[in-house]
Image (cartoon, rainbow, N blue to C red):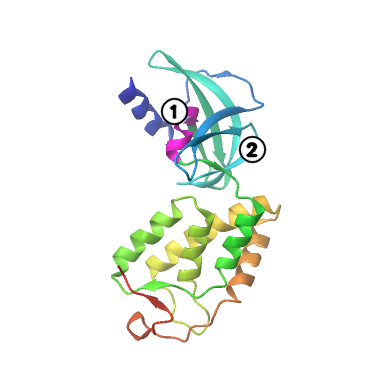
């Protein structure tokens, strides 16, 4: 059973199209349903999600639960969250028992958003190590779904006018992190995406200005030695 459900879950993460219409679904209570989510102390707590609620799915960012449905898979009934990522034109179906394992969470609280924005004003911490390794670390932070970790990527890859331009791969990671952060801030603070980007840019402008230099020329204040 477990292998069948795991395979089904992977398939549902693909973009839906008319040619791949889902089986008939039976709607259930749209008000709310609960799923266990791990806490920082290693325990678990019941987190309630409901239809039309905005959530954060680590691998895709902010999405909205459009329905809570029940579907029969391999002879077993599964309760599913139907999540829409409108900007990416994608729909994802997540079995409620999978919520904890995939890291799906509620939107960040106001104090977490403030801490993330404050993170942008700090000095960039760039490890003196190969770019390929740093790129993997940045990507892991982006896909962690942690707003503060994502803010660290934005801070570290940001380039002011007096600094060298980003490489293509740096730019891709920077824009991915910036987009994830802006979307969540926009929903939490009820802003447009453009307004959220302006808020982020305003914080980045407060960060210590680094002179144009390469990693090899960076001083100890800018560089964190790799472990």
Above or below 108: residue 207: below
| Mark 1: few/some/many CA within 10 Å (<14, 14-19, 20+) | few
Asked if residue 218 shows in the view, the reply is yes
For the C terminus, which image quadrant? Answer: bottom left
Residue sitting at 56 percent across and 23 percent down? 69
Q: Is residue 98 magenta?
A: yes
Q: Is residue 202 magenta?
A: no
Residue sitting at 57 percent across and 61 percent down? 116
| Mark 2: few/some/many CA within 10 Å (<14, 14-19, 20+) | some
Which is closer to the viewer, label 1 or label 2? 2
For the N terminus, which image quadrant? Answer: top left
Above or below 105: residue 115: below
- Between marks 1 and 2, how big is the CA–CA gap? 26 Å
> Left or right: 64 with respect to 97?
right
Asked if residue 15 shows in the view, the reply is no
Give the prevailing secondary structure in the magenta stretch.
helix
Above or below 114: residue 36: above
Q: Quadrant of residue 32?
A: top right
Number of numbered markers? 2
Q: Quadrant of residue 113?
A: bottom right
In depth, the one of 194 and 4 nearer the eye is 4
Which SS class for mark 1? helix
**Circle 1 sits on which residue?**
20
Q: Position of residue 108 (x, y in %)?
A: 60, 50
> Left or right: 212 with respect to 115?
left
The tag on residue 53 is 2
User: Over which residues does the magenta segment extend?
Assistant: 94-102
């Amino acid at each position: 059973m477990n292998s069948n459900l795991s395979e089904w879950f992977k398939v549902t993460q693909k973009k839906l199209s008319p040619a791949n219409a889902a089986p008939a679904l039976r709607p259930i209570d749209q008000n709310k349903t609960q799923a266990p989510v791990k806490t920082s102390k290693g325990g678990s707590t019941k987190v309630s999600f409901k239809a039309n609620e905005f959530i954060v799915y680590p691998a895709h960012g902010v999405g909205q639960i459009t329905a809570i449905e029940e579907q029969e898979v391999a002879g077993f009934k599964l309760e599913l969250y139907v999540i829409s990522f409108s900007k990416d034109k994608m729909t994802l179906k997540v079995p409620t028992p999978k919520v904890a394992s995939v890291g799906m969470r509620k939107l960040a609280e106001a104090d977490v958003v403030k801490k993330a924005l404050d993170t942008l004003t700090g000095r960039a911490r760039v490890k003196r190590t190969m770019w390929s390794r740093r790129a993997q670390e940045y990507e892991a932070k982006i896909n962690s779904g942690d707003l503060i970790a994502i803010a660290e990527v934005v801070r570290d890859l940001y380039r002011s006018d007096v600094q060298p331009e980003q490489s293509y791969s740096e730019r891709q990671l920077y824009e991915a992190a910036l987009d994830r952060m802006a979307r969540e801030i926009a929903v939490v603070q009820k802003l447009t995406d453009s307004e959220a980007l302006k808020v982020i840019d305003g914080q980045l402008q407060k960060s210590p200005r680094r002179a144009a230099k390469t990693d090899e020329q960076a001083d100890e204040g800018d560089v964190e030695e790799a472990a």
